[in-house]
């Protein structure tokens, strides 16, 4: 799963590995809390570029983020469903332990928007009070 495709001059992409959820003998592989499970059935019935992106129940190992040379990638298979991309974002935040940073960014943005809204609110004239 490609997370980030860098531009010139770098020729790398940032990825997280996707692997089958079950061993060849049918036994489920061990997963951890930051592994995102992807259900193949959600992709079988999907439309457009999402259809058949995942053909077997799989999982993404979010703790194994890495950069690889672009030439190592053979072909684009498809895209994750928006709901799975949202989950992946959350799992990456947890895996990278960015919860506090994200919380502070959200608080700062809410404060900025409140101040902006207060500045844009029409002021009442003294005689209307």
Image (cartoon, rainbow, N blue to C red):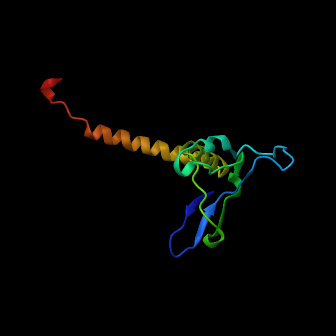
Q: Residue furthest right?
A: 25
For the image, the number of numbered tags is 0
Choose between 88 and 76: the one closer to the eye: 76
Seen at 32% across and 42% down, the residue is 116
- Percent x, y for residue 35? 71, 47
- Percent x, y for residue 111? 41, 41
Q: Residue furthest top?
A: 129
Name the image quarter holding the C terminus: top left
* Horizontal side, residue 116 vs residue 68: left or right: left
* Horizontal side, residue 125 vs residue 60: left or right: left
- Percent x, y for residue 108? 45, 45
Seen at 77% across and 45% down, the residue is 31
Q: Is residue 39 visible?
A: no
Q: Is residue 116 visible?
A: yes
Seen at 84% across and 44% down, the residue is 26
Choose between 106 and 59: the one closer to the eye: 59
* Horizontal side, residue 127 vs residue 115: left or right: left
Name the image quarter holding the N terminus: bottom right
Q: Residue furthest bottom?
A: 9
Q: Quadrant of residue 18?
A: bottom right
* Horizontal side, residue 91 vs residue 123: left or right: right
Choose between 49 and 70: the one closer to the eye: 49
Seen at 54% across and 47% down, the residue is 102
- Percent x, y for residue 8? 50, 74
Q: Quadrant of residue 45?
A: top right
């Amino acid at each position: 799963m490609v997370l980030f495709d860098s531009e010139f001059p770098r020729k790398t992409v940032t990825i997280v590995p996707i692997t089958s959820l079950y061993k060849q003998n049918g036994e489920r592989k061990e997963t951890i809390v930051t592994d995102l499970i992807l259900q193949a059935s959600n992709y079988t019935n999907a439309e457009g570029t999402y259809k058949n992106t995942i053909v077997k129940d799989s999982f993404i190992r979010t703790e194994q983020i890495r950069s690889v040379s672009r030439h190592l990638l053979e072909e684009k298979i498809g895209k994750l469903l928006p709901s799975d991309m949202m989950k992946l974002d959350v799992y990456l935040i947890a895996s990278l332990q960015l919860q506090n940073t994200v919380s502070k960014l959200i608080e700062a943005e809410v404060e900025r928007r409140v101040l902006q809204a207060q500045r844009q609110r029409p002021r009442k004239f003294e005689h209307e009070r």
